[in-house]
């Protein structure tokens, strides 16, 4: 088992428990759709500060979630030792996105700017995103130099509330009202 962090690992799911007696585990996938988790390969888990490669040789939907079998894990007792561990995969295995599409991780920590009276005003930085069903939402937290200390929830609607995303400049320009000071 490797003990160094492989290049650019991204967390794509978490092992939530066991399934059956033959070493299968339940997985909460962070991918969309959920079964993309099984397509990536190059999986790693972190245990005790050490990264270890793991291999899933088969998996399927069971009930409302995924279950999978790890190579070399053939009994429930061993499978239980993986409960609660996050599973990561190399960034290189993620599919390329089309122009104007972004992974959430690319938007996190970007500065969010709004335009008012032909001047740009810093609202804060993207802390994280929420999935609401209707659309995703940017959770914008205050930062050094921001307008105020308020957290804002801004719908992620490209072409509407989101005017421009510029990864090279570390910023998002939004069409958003500036609250009373």
Image (spheres, rainbow, N blue to C red):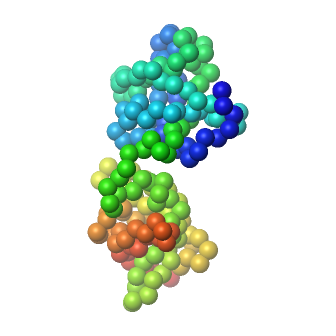
Q: Where does the image place residue 49, in percent across and percent down from the top left?
A: 70, 37
> Height in image: 50 above or below 120?
above
From where the camera sits, is residue 124 visible? yes
Relative side of 116 to 157, left or right: right
Image quadrant where residue 143 sits: bottom right
Q: Residue at x 50, y 10 (%)?
A: 22
Q: Residue at x 37, y 71 (%)?
A: 164
Q: Residue at x 55, y 10 (%)?
A: 75
Residue at the farthest bottom position: 117
From where the camera sits, is residue 135 visible? no
Q: Where does the image place residue 19, in percent across and percent down from the top left?
A: 47, 17
Q: Residue at x 47, y 57 (%)?
A: 106
Q: Where does the image place residue 64, in percent across and percent down from the top left?
A: 36, 28
> Height in image: 143 above or below 87?
below
Relative side of 45 to 28, left or right: right
> Height in image: 23 above or below 106?
above
């Amino acid at each position: 088992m490797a003990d160094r962090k492989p290049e650019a690992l991204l967390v794509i799911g978490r092992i939530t428990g066991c399934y059956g007696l033959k070493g299968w585990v339940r997985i909460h996938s962070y991918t969309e759709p959920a079964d993309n988790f099984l397509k990536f390969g190059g999986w790693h888990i972190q245990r005790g500060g050490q990264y270890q490669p793991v291999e899933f040789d088969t998996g399927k939907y069971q009930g409302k979630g995924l279950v999978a079998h790890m190579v070399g894990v053939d009994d429930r007792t061993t499978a239980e030792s993986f409960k609660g561990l996050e599973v990561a995969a190399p960034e290189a295995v993620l599919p390329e996105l089309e122009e104007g599409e972004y992974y959430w991780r690319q938007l996190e920590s970007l500065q969010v700017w709004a335009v008012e009276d032909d001047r740009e005003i810093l609202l804060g930085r993207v802390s994280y995103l929420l999935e609401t069903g209707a659309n995703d939402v940017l959770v914008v937290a205050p930062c050094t130099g921001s307008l105020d200390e308020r957290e804002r929830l801004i719908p992620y609607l490209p072409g509407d509330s989101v005017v421009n995303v510029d990864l090279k400049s570390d910023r998002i320009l939004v069409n958003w009202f500036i609250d009373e000071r």
